[in-house]
Structure formats: structure tokens, C-alpha cells
Amino acid sequence: MSRLTGKIALITGTASGQGRAAALLFAAEGATVVGTDLDADGAAGTVEMVRAAGGRMDSTHPLDLSDEAAVKAWIDEAAARHGGIDILYNNAAATRFSPLTETSYKDWSFTLRNELDTVFLATKHAWSHLIARGGGSVLLVGSTAGITGSITNHRVAHTTGKGGIVAMTRQLAAEGAAHGIRVNCVSPGMIQTPASANTLLADDHPMRTIARHIPLGRIGAPEEVVRCALFLVSDDASYVTGANLVIDGGWSAVLPGAS
Ligand SMILES: NC(=O)c1ccc[n+]([C@@H]2O[C@H](COP(=O)([O-])OP(=O)(O)OC[C@H]3O[C@@H](n4cnc5c(N)ncnc54)[C@H](O)[C@@H]3O)[C@@H](O)[C@H]2O)c1
């Protein structure tokens, strides 16, 4: 359990769900984790959990990742405190689901700001620190929504945002290569987290029964995403950049109703 020994890993959205799971796993693998989230109580709780498990973590919260000055300060201060950074895991996001004609410009802007602007800002301000380190690893979080449309879940803004994440991964991989910066993406399918529990997996939502369409027959767990994230940011993936690893139990690989 030491694939990240000596690494400084910045993770966004550490208050809950996959971000909390990533903080626990990366710290267990030897990283010093630097977290952040809008949700101060949840973020502080994750720090406590990591430290109780014997890991190293600090966190700046509350922090809105669409506030450029705050993002830059979070990253610069982390680099100064720890002597540099090796990994940026752009996990945080917030979204609003709705069909095209019911999507207000405000909802569209909210989703793209919280799915794309946040990732752009954190990566932009981490970049020079990664170059100074002689390279590093950046992870983006897409979604099956970024590579498929959906009849059941109307999500034009989310689909566009996560499609943008997959595209951004490839462009950043191209720009990072000369600096030794690898950039990859994990694209989860349906994962059991607070975000999905309150929306797509709520009792009255048509997506509730989606598990029967997933070849592996169940919803995924946050730990199943972050173990793949660990692989991509670690030296085990030293020849992997520009990849989009889909973690969806085979959901996007099959046509609905196909046997
Ligand atoms: N849960 C799923 O089924 C699923 C599926 C595909 C992709 N994803 C993606 O996985 C990632 C993690 O999602 P999750 O399910 O763990 O969600 P979550 O809501 O449990 O966690 C996301 C965290 O990000 C934080 N956050 C959101 N916007 C922020 C901002 N502007 N500044 C600071 N913090 C902010 C939230 O406060 C929250 O703690 C997201 O990128 C999400 O889009 C999730």
C-alpha cells in the first residue's frame, strides 16, 4: 500500500462521495492529500477520517472552485506548504438535470461553471507547479453522460459539460506531454453517492431501476472509481495519457435491450 509515497495530491470535492473515498485511498497509499470543498463540515470530516486512519491530509474550506483568486491561492499555498505538487484530481462538480426546453440559461451556466470552469481554473493554476516539479499527473472526471445521450435522463447541460471534460483531457494531454504531465479521465456510470442518491437514484426517479440495464447488474461504489483513479495517477500508468477510462459496469458498452 505505497503507490503514492512522497506524492503531494490535491483533490477537489473532498467533502463527500468519490472525493472523500479518494482522499482516504490516496492517503492510505502514502500521499499527502490536500483537499477542498464548498461544504466545510463535510471537508473537515474527511480530514478527521483520513487522520484517524493514520494518513496525512489538510484542507481549505469552504472554497468555491469557480472563484479564480481562491483557487489560485489554494494551489499556491499548498505548493508552498508542501514544497510542490505532484497530482491534481479534479473530482468536484455540481450539475442540474433538465431537458433542453426546460433548461434556463441560469441552469445551463450553473452546470458548465461547476463542471468545466472549475476544472479549467484548478488545472491552469496547478500547471506551472507541475512543470516546476518536472512533471506530474492530472485527473479529470467525466461521466458516461459525456459519451452518450440518454432518453431516460434529460441532461443537455450535463452531457455538454462532461463531453467537454473528455475533450479537455485530450487537449491537456497534448499540451502536458512535453512537460512530463500526464492527463487522464475517469468516466463513472451510475455510482452510489450523496449526489446520485438525492437525484437519479431517488425513489420516484425513472433512473431508479437502471441497474437491470447494467451488464454487471448493480450500481457502482465510490471506491470502485477511485481505485481506477489511483492507477491512472500512479507510476503504474506511466505510459498512459489522454485516456478516458469508463467505469460503468459495462453500461455504455451495450445497447439497451440487447442480449
Ligand atoms: N455519482 C455518480 O453517479 C456520478 C456519475 C458520473 C460522474 N460523476 C462525477 O463524479 C464526481 C464526484 O461526484 P460525487 O457523486 O462524488 O458527487 P458529490 O456531490 O457527492 O461530491 C461532489 C463534491 O464537490 C463539491 N463541489 C461541487 N461544486 C463545487 C465548487 N464549485 N467548489 C467546491 N466544491 C464543489 C460538492 O460540495 C461535493 O462535496 C463529479 O465530477 C461527478 O460529476 C458522478
Image: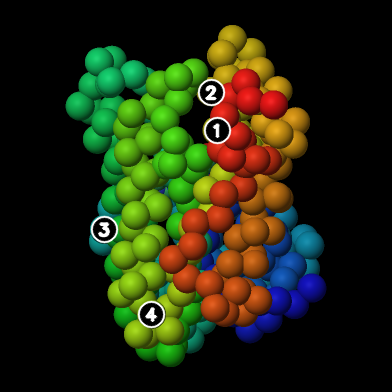
Identify the mark at residue 195; answer none if there is no mark: 1
User: Mark 1: few, some, or many residues within 10 Å (few <14, many ≥20)?
Assistant: some
Number of marks in picture: 4
Which residue matches tag 2? Answer: 199
Amino acid type at circle 1 is Ala
Q: Marks 2/3: CA distance?
A: 29 Å
**Any atom of ligand 1 within 8 Å of the CB at mark 1?**
yes
Residue depicted at 62% across the width and 79% down the height:
235
Amino acid type at circle 3 is Glu
**In which quadrant is the C terminus drawn?**
top right
Given residues 124 and 244, the one toward you in this image is: 244
Q: Is residue 72 visible?
A: no
Which residue matches tag 3? Answer: 68
Amino acid type at circle 4 is Ala
Find residue 233 and report its horizontal and vertical position in percent: 57, 70
Secondary structure of the residue carrying numbered label 1: helix
Which residue matches tag 4? Answer: 177
The vertical placement of 14 against 125, above or below, is above
The vertical placement of 247 against 217, above or below, is below
Secondary structure of the residue carrying numbered label 4: helix
**In which quadrant is the N terminus drawn?**
bottom right
Residue at the extreme left of the image, as rendered? 105
Disc 1 versus disc 3: nearer the observer: 1
Contact check, label 2 and label 1, Cβ < 8 Å: yes
Disc 4 versus disc 2: nearer the observer: 4
Q: Earlier in the sequence, mark 4 or mark 1?
A: 4
Decide if residue 132 is on the left or right side of residue 102.
right
